Each structure stands twice: as structure tokens, then as C-alpha cells.
Image (cartoon, helix red, strand yellow):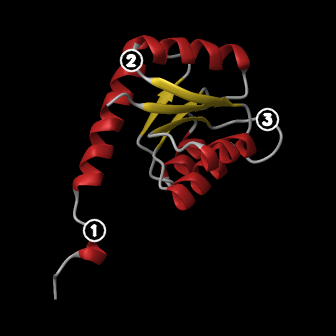
Amino acid sequence: MVPQILIVEDNAIVAEDLKLKLNKLGCRVTGIAYSGLEAIKHVQQKIPDIVLMDIRLGPGINGIETATLLMRDFKIPVIYLTAHADSDTLAKASATHPYGYIIKPFNDKELASTIENALHTLAADNARPNAKGSNAT
């Protein structure tokens, strides 16, 4: 299975560089969204396996708010991309239960290992029995 990844990044240069790196890793980029609203519209048409989400987006809803909506409404795991690793930002992001963090600037090995770990976590989460569907009494 080729991982399907949506990039949500308001810096076009960073987004295109990230797309090239993901393609080299064997991932398929389903699109690049430059805002939270673009990300939501994209996901309504094509649901990726994972979203790489910049925490600080331009005007409109930020990455944490966007991730919260995507995880709640579409059950899509998020890996945060951020240059802002202060404790307040990380605490807010952690509350959304992301599948990982990538601190900018990052290297190819960090990107690859974070995505690989997220995919393993996603596979494990999908393999767990659904509590609603269990026969436990």
C-alpha cells in the first residue's frame, strides 16, 4: 500500500520541497492545502491516510483547530509540522493526540521515521477491535 498524504502548509516553497521528499520516500501526495479551510475541502473529496499539518497557518483557522476537525469528522491521523516547539504550542497540539511531530527544519531521516511510525500506529489502531462491535457483556 502506498501511503496517501495531504500536506497542509502555508509556505509554498516548504510545501513543494516536502512533496518532493515524500515522493522520494514512496508516498503519494494527494494534494497541498495552504489553509485549514482548503484542507477540509480537500479531505471532503479525497481522504488521505495521514495529514502533515503545519501548526501555524496564515489567516483563518490554525493547524491545531484544523487537525481537531479532521480527526473528529474524518478520523484522519495528523502529524504536526512546526517551527514553534514552545511548551504552550506543544501542549495545545498534544491535546489533539497527533501521530507525531516534525520540528522544522527537519531532515529526510526524521521525516521518513515519523511517517513510518505513524503508519505503524495507524495499522495497529485499525487492527484493534471496535468496542461497539465487541460481544463483551
Element carrying mark 2: loop
Which residue, given by chain and number where applicable, does mark 2 sit on? 26
Amino acid on which disc 2 is placed: Gly
Q: In the image, is 119 to the left or to the right of 111?
A: left
Furthest toward the left, the residue is 136
Residue bearing the label numbered 3: 58
Say which quadrant the N terminus sits in.
top left
The residue lying furthest to the front in this view is 45
Callout 2 environment at 10 Å: few (<14), some (14 to 19), or many (20+)?
Answer: few
Q: How many marks?
A: 3
Instruction: Please report contact status of discs 1 and 2: CB closer than 8 Å, yes or no.
Output: no
Residue 55 in the image: x percent, y percent?
63, 38
Residue underneath mark 1: 130
Residue for point 21% across, 76% down = 134
Task: Tell me how far mark 3 sits from mark 1, CA to CA.
Answer: 37 Å
- Distance from disc 1 to disc 2, alpha carbons, whole Å, reads 30 Å
Label of residue 93 in the image: none
* Residue 59 in picture, x, y percent from top left: 83, 40
Q: CA distance from mark 3 to mark 2?
A: 29 Å
Is the C-beta separation of discs 3 and 2 under 8 Å? no
Q: Nearer the viewer, mark 3 or mark 1?
A: 1
